[in-house]
Amino acid sequence: MNQKKRSIVILAAGKGSRLKSNKAKVLHEICGKPMLYHIIKEAEKISDDVSVVIAHQKEQVRKMIESYFDNINFVEQDADKFPGTGGALKNYAPRYEQVLVLNGDMPLVTAEAMEQFFKMKESDIVMSIFDLDDPSGYGRVVIDENEVCYIVEQKDANKKELAVTTVNAGVYAFKRDILEKFIPLLKNDNAQNEYYLTDIIEMAKNEGLGVRALLVDEEHFKGVNSKKDLAEAEMILCRRIRNKWMQKGITMQLPETIYIESDVVFEGECIIEQGCRITEGARIVNSHIKAHSIVEESEVIDSDVGPLAHLRPKSLLRDTHIGNFVEVKKSTLTGVKAGHLSYIGDAEANEGTNIGAGMITCNYDGINKHKTKIGKNVFIGSDSQLVAPVTIEDNVIIAAGTTVPSGTVETGVLAISRAPLKKVKGFFQKFFTKKEKQ
């Protein structure tokens, strides 16, 4: 896509009070990233002049943007002095003649959807519109053969105007000189005391300028104003992510039950079963993730995981089997089998090692985390505890029920620690007879 000769500005100054949260509206996440991230990522595909207008929680918003992007222009606005969509552009100076104005609460917009506005170069202003079955509560946009005639608020509309189903979608493309001319002329003499971009439409029409209507689909330009909207947007984006990977050959069972974040990567032949959650930073290569498993910021290569397993961040599995109710955290496992009910944290284990049910690495002493190193061909019996820092060398057997203290278990040995079994004859009868008498 062409990245030249067009500017994009994203209005991200609002509080988002309807979200009922202390967090700035544009910082609410969908599929693992703030809403604003998704918009900027798409905008950068078609423009090298992307600006973001910030006001509410501007430092937090700026910090988030700078953690992901290098070349974003920030327009700091005094939202108390210049509230509203028009006020947000008071200090904005686009680099190019064509300018697209986006809202920061439209995380589903794509570069292809934005490109539609730039294709209408002959228009002075391009205004996006929806056609709704029920436009109640929206201002109506009256058009004549794709030319916008005027906008009327519902409370001011007559019967004929109320029958109009075309409403403002809130995204505009302007020629730069139009913004430079009309932004300083905006007034806030309305009930909300705000400066509105829509007032430019009326001023432009009064001067004989053309305002073209662009019919857009609601999915790409859906605004997020509530937690319900946020959830709906996430469902749509997650569906797009799943569809992208299935088209590339990834098998998904009951895909609508699978949650995948935006930066997850799949390679080769992979199967993802129902109910899985795979989050940002995960890389799955030629592997099978079984039902209701969680993979967080981990790599799974030529392995199978689950069902009902949990890979916490910074884990790496190669040629490894992880079974039911196994949790792995910040560990590297190569050629390992851990079939069920184990916790493996801050560890590394190598080829041919078998980890029995109920084994745990005791990696935390209450202050610091410590490392467990397990060599090749180690057999660890059920219900064992490895107290880190500990090294288990190659070809070792850890007997079931053994607690291995910090230190080293040398190659070729059997490690066993068990209290002698004590048998008390007749205890069963004595115990229950006593209970019955009570």
Image: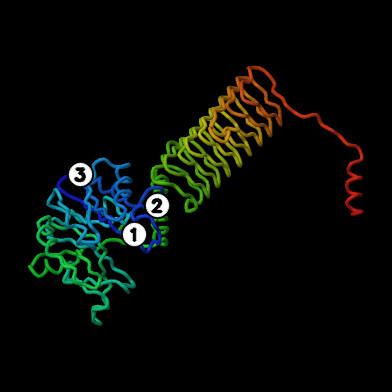
Classify mark 3: helix, strand or loop.
loop
Tag 3 or tag 1, which sits nearer the N-term?
3
Q: Which residue is mark 2?
A: 30
Classify mark 1: helix, strand or loop.
loop
Classify mark 2: helix, strand or loop.
strand
Q: How many residues crowd around disc 1 within 10 Å: few (fewer than 14), some, or many (20 or more)?
A: few
Q: Nearer the viewer, residue 391 or 132?
A: 391
Q: Residue at x 52, y 39 (%)?
A: 311
Marks 2 and 3: in contact by CB < 8 Å? Answer: no
The kind of residue tagged 1 is Glu
Q: Which residue is mark 3?
A: 48
Residue 189 lies, with reference to residue 73, above or below; the image says: below
Q: Which residue is mark 1?
A: 219
Disc 1 from disc 2: Cα separation: 15 Å
Q: How many residues crowd around disc 2 within 10 Å: few (fewer than 14), some, or many (20 or more)?
A: many
The kind of residue tagged 2 is Ile
Q: Which of the 4 quarters of the picture holds residue 185? A: bottom left
Q: Residue at x 47, y 44 (%)?
A: 278
Number of numbered markers: 3
Instruction: Give residue 58's position: percent from left, percent from top.
Output: 29, 51
| Closer mark to the observer between disc 1 and disc 2 | 2
Residue 4 lies, with reference to residue 334, above or below; the image says: below
Instruction: Give residue 221's position: percent from left, percent from top.
Output: 30, 59
Disc 3 from disc 2: Cα separation: 25 Å
